[in-house]
Structures are given as structure tokens and as C-alpha cells.
Image (cartoon, grey):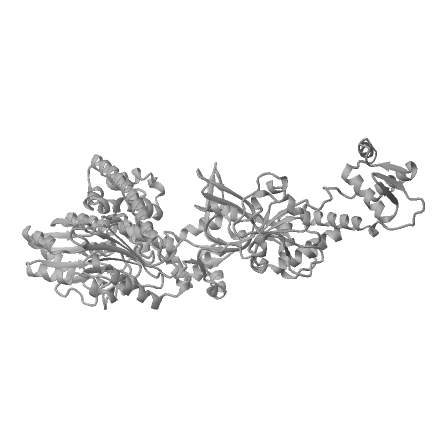
Amino acid sequence: MLEAKARWRISEDKEDEAEETAGRLAAELSLHPLVARLLAVRGWTRAEDARRFLYGGAELFHDPFLLKGMAEAVNRIRHSLREGEKIRIYGDYDADGISSTTLMIFLMKRLGACYDTYIPHRIHEGYGLNREALDQAAAAGVKLIVTVDTGISAKKEIAYAAGLGMDVVVTDHHEPPPELPDQAVALVNPKQPDCPYPCKELAGVGVAFKLAHALLGELPREWLEIAAIGTVADLMPLVDENRLIVKLGLEQMRHTANLGLKALLDVAGVERGSVNEGHIGFSLAPRINASGRMQHANLAVRLLTTESEQEASHLAYDLDVLNKERQKTVEDMMKEAMALLDGRDMDSQRVIIAAKEGWNVGVAGIVASKLLERFYRPVIVFAIDGKTGVAKGSARSIAGFDIHHALTECSGLLEHFGGHQAAAGLTLRADLIPELEDRLSRLALEELQQEDLTPIIQADLSCSLAETTLSCIEQLSVLAPFGSGNPSPRFVFNKLRIAGKRTMGKDRQHLKLTLEEPVEAAPACSVEAVSFNCGTAAERLAMASSLDLVGELSVNVWNGSRKPQILIHDMRVSEPQVFDWRGTAAKKGMRPPELPEGSGILIFYRNAADGLPEEWRHFPLWLIEEGMEEDPRPMNRTALLTDVRDLRDVVLYTLPSGRESLDKIVALLDKLRRVYAVFADASGIGGARLPDREVFKQFYALLVREKELNAGDARVWPALKKRFGLEEPAARMLLVIFEELGFVRKEGLRYYAAEAVQKRDLTQSALYRRMMNQDRMEQLYIYSTAAELRELILEARSDGEESTLESKRRMNR
């Protein structure tokens, strides 16, 4: 068995009702049946709605004046333009805030405004409006502040700005607090109460884009590429307008004229013509974010707005260097955080808080995300200022625990906080961290069950390998761009047979499987599957095992060849696995493979214990005798202290003495996970095989003619081999069988032909019967394929009766 790392949720309950819908979508939109089923289970039931989703363009953007407060914001900004008032764009230091500030710079230039920009320093000032920055704005003659990606929670700060004679227009997308900034001249946030705007999940840059749309009176398509960066970086759901922003923005980015974007794509090693949402999320956004995390966000704003190719190149290089520094800082903080958490009982821990003086608050969110990924608990990482005693932190949460709501419940402890269900930022006195942890833990205990602490993988459909054609996989791309709200399609495949496995990569850290799906009356369908950073799983997967997996479909291109491939997200083996160790070092007497701790070893012949590899002798050892009526007999002290029924990993060291013996022991082990089939020869027969009956007749005729055979004469055995093809062990075996039947008598080392012999069948010899059984056992367990061996052993768990495989073989004889 192999347990899955996550809980799999599949839209199976929707599949039955979606079949009819899928057929209609496939016909009307000319879609592959699997793509149509996918759309149906995702809720696209009308062909016209699905067509708009797949192929819709700029015509689907909403009227920006549907946003509550937009008319007031536009009027106030136009007043500043008419009067020549100085406007300050007040942004945020993350990729969304940087994109928003950049877009507003382009807008202000287009409008001919008198303006400047301000982004607070992440470490020295923190998130949002602050009084010192407002004092500086007033001193600089600013009359209007327009916030982007911030401001909805700044009630006190906006009142302070009003007292300084400055108006504030807020454009934001974060969760509004119970008390809104009532002295702002306009609040533009689709999440605020009574806002009728259809798309509630715009990024900060999305709201800024709508403001530009409203002020210009037309869609500013040339800035979609900037809006796409913040939308992807802030993990906004890629539906409705967000999907349009990213889809159209990527089309523009592939032919961008923006010098900063060109330089950033080049330094990130991304080919412009093939840039996609993944490149934004994992190549562009981290470098843009690195400016605010490690120095100041203005670096990235300058890059995205520069008109100098040389400056663009220098700034892109600087951001790349900062990103490498950021990666090193994250790595160091992770090591320190793990050291702080070492020794904690994570099974009982509901909320994880790690805090340390001197940490870089700029990467606290990244470290929190990595800790969440490792432990799957709500996490807060604090950086403590040793001089002020203030702790600034970033929180990340799991499904089922709204971290913003939880922080609201603890707001009396906090100086400042903001965010949403999955992520938040907060500030408090460092000495209050233990109390905050206590309160959050109590809230988590009330809201989270034990099963909530296991990650969830949401899959769309169960499907077969036969459906994973190149044309189908290529057509899935019409659903892109993928991201939150429109994830890359995930499929569940059940009962695939492992036909091949190998590790790959420089450090063999990745796993590649060849998987087959047997189809009755048809050739097996085969596909390759890759699991990254999962190379160690190769040792825990047995050939021919029945594997379930959840993963994405992709096209593998190699040397001009294109073929389907599955990218594995998680996998499981629900039945015990049978590892084929026949012919391994254990059988040859060389260094044996390493066994998992807790394994048990079973032998079917007492003398087999003498040949057990030294490295395995400390494992519990049991003897199973033919016709076993009681439990296996312990053969060492370790076995005496172990209940054989509790074994999960078992080595079948010798060939069974009979099918029934193996069936009984396998059926007894109801906790069995893995079986290691070695089947070394320890029967005492020395590998001899029964010859056919004609050899028996000729050998006995020789004995009758010669009257005697001297087994002590070394010349006898080569002569018998030359005449009958019998090796010495086989010849000695025949002599024992003749003796048991009374055909010969033995005196010392000499065998004499009996004078009066009754006709007897060979099966009356105990050794002959044993050899017949040995031959049958070898045919079943030694000469079977890995798939047949698995079938033989696992069938014993169900009923212990004669296997289907054995029945087939008998019929074919």
C-alpha cells in the first residue's frame, strides 16, 4: 500500500447530470468529449455561456461606472486636472501594488496630470497609509491622494489627511472593515457593501484599470499586460474580468513594447513569444516582488515605466540579483523556523507561529507559505524589531479557517491588520504574541477538525488513459489562462498498472512511471507519468501494482516527438504491494536489499533459517509448516515479542511448501501493506528438478542390469550425466525415490536393485510427491511474471482458494 498525501475531492456527484450537457456542448462547440465534460462539471451548462468563457474578448468588460464610488472618484480627479492640483499616487510594495502604481503613472501621463508617486518602505513604514507620509505629502503641496491596492482600512489616516487639507480617493480590493473611511471623497472597492459590480474579485491593479477605463472613456488595452501581472501575482480568481485581463494581457505581452518587461523576460530566461500565466507567477512576479522585499518597490516601478533600454537592462539585472538574495534569505529563515518548531507536537498543534528578532519581514509571507505547505496548518511568521519591540508578520491559512475573520476576533491585541481568508498582514507588540497564539489556537480548535489538517486536492473528473490523446490535451488549452478560480484541469485515474519505473534528474530526485490501463479484448493503453521531487517513492512502488493517481495532462516534446504525459500531483496504492525480489542479492547470498524497519520474515522450511542473510537476522522470523493449523511458529526472540498479525511488511524468503500454506498466512495478515517475494531455494533438494518418466525407466533398467551402484565412487555421477543428462542432485533424488518405493535397497553408500519388486506408482514416494509439489510451486511462484505473482499473492487475501492464474495454467497443460 501507499497512502495519498492529500484528500482527493472529485466532482463525481456532478458527472452523471453533466453527461447530457457535455454531449450538447461537444456537438455545438466542436469540443473533445473530455473537454466538454470538464466544462459541464465546472458549471458551464449553456453553450452560449461556455462560448463566451472560451472565446470571449474585450467586448465582455463591464461598465466601470457600475463600481460604487467610481463616479465620485472620476469627478474628483477631473477637478484636480482642471485646477492643476498636485496628485499623489499612493501604492503598495507588492507586485499588485507595483503594477497598480505603474498603471496609474501611465494614466496620469496620458491625462497630463501634475502628479508623483509614493510607496511606503516595507520594513521602515509597513503597509498602507501612515501619518509621516501624509505629513510629507501635505508639505509637498499635494491636494489629492489616490490610493491603489490599499486604503480601505485606513479610516484614521484618511481623517488625518482631511485635517491636513488633502482629499483621498481610495481604490482597493481588500476586505472592507466594519467601519469604512467615511472622510474619503470616494471609495472604489467592489467588495464594499452595496456595490453592484458583477466582478467582486478584481486585484488592486484591476480596480486601477477600471478607474483608467472610466477616466479615458475607453478600454486602455495597451495596459492590460501590466494589469495581468498584478492579477496573477495576487492569486485572483481567473474568471470574469480577471480572465479577460490575463488572457488579453498575455497576448499583448508576447509582443510587448514595454522596455522593462522585455528586459525582465530576458533576464528570467522566458521566451517572449510563449509567455504564459505560469511565467508571470513564477518568473516575473518574484523578481518584481524582490524589490519591495529586499530594498524598495520603486526599483520595479522604475523598471516598468522606463523609456531607456539601457536603464531597463540594468534594473532587470538588479532585480534578478535581489531575487537570488531573497531566495537565500528565505532558505536561511526556513532553517531557523524549523529549528524553533523542532520538538513541538504538530499533531496537536492547530496554529503555528514562528517569531524571531532580526528576521526580514519582507519574506515572512513566503516563509509562512512554505511552513503551511510542510505542516498544513494556519501559519504566522513574525519579524521582531529588537529596538521597538514591535512584531510585524504575515499569515497564511488553510481551507476552513478564515484568518482575516480570526484576526478580527483578536483585533484588541493588534495595532494593525488586513487581508482576506487565506492571507493577512498584522502588527502587534512582540510580548503579546503568546496571547495571540493562544486565542487563535482556541478559535482553530473550534473550527478545524482533525481531517481539516490534511491537504485537499480538488479534481475535476475521473477518466481513462484512452481519453488522453494529443488532440484532447491540446484542446484543453482553450480553457487557459489557468489559476485560482480556473485551475489547470486535474483528472483522477484508477487502477493503472505500473509497467515501468525509473528515477531521473541530476540527483535522481524525480520519478517517471510507465502506466498501463488494461482493456479487455484490446491492447493495453500505456502512458508515461512524471512526479517531480518524488524520486524516493520509487522504492515504495512495486512493479505491476495497481496505482490510483490525480494529475494534470501535458504534452511531452522530445527530439521532435510529441506524446501525452501525466504530471502527478498525488498517488496511492490501495492494495498491498508485491515487490519482486526473486533473483536478488538475498537469493544469491550477496548483500541483500535494505528492509523497512518492522518487517517480518517468513520461511517454509526449517533449514532455511541457516541461510538467512546476516543483515536480516535481527528481524522477527517465523516458520510456516505444511498443513499449518496454528499460527506460524516463532524462530527467534524478536518473533516471540512480536504479534505476527500486526505485520505490515513481510518477506517471503523461501518458496512455499504448498499453495495452501501461503494462502493461509497471507489471509492472516490483515494489516499487510508490502510483500517482498524472495523465494530462495531452501527446500533441501538442492535445486534438483524431476526428470520425465522415461528417464526413471532407463535409470531403473540400468540398476537392474548392473545390480548395484556405488554412490561413493566419484566416477558414477559424470557417467550418469553423460548417459541420462542427470546432474548429481537429480540422480541422488531418483535413488531416494526408488528406495522409498522398495525398488532398491541401500547398504552404506551402495544401492542394490531389489530382487522381487511390486508394481507401484511413483506418487507413492513421499519425495516424489514433494518434488511434484516443488515443481508446481516453482511454476507458480518462480516462473510467473511480476503481474502474475501479484495476482497469486493478493488473491489469497480474498478467499484462499485456487487462483484464477493456476486454473488457467492447468487448462493450458
- Nearer to me, 793 or 773: 773
Q: Is residue 739 above or below residue 149?
A: above
Q: Relative to 415, is 749 on the left or the right?
A: right
The location of residue 768, given as percent across then percent down, is 80, 48
Q: For the view shown, which residue lies furthest in the right direction?
A: 756
The answer to whether residue 577 is seen in the rendering is no
The location of residue 360, given as percent across then percent down, is 24, 48
- Nearer to me, 544 or 367: 367
The location of residue 189, given as percent across then percent down, is 22, 61
Total count of labels: 0
The answer to whether residue 477 is seen in the rendering is yes
- Nearer to me, 355 or 9: 355
Q: Relative to 613, is 220 on the left or the right?
A: left
Q: For the view shown, which residue lies furthest in the top direction?
A: 715
The location of residue 79, given as percent across then percent down, is 10, 57
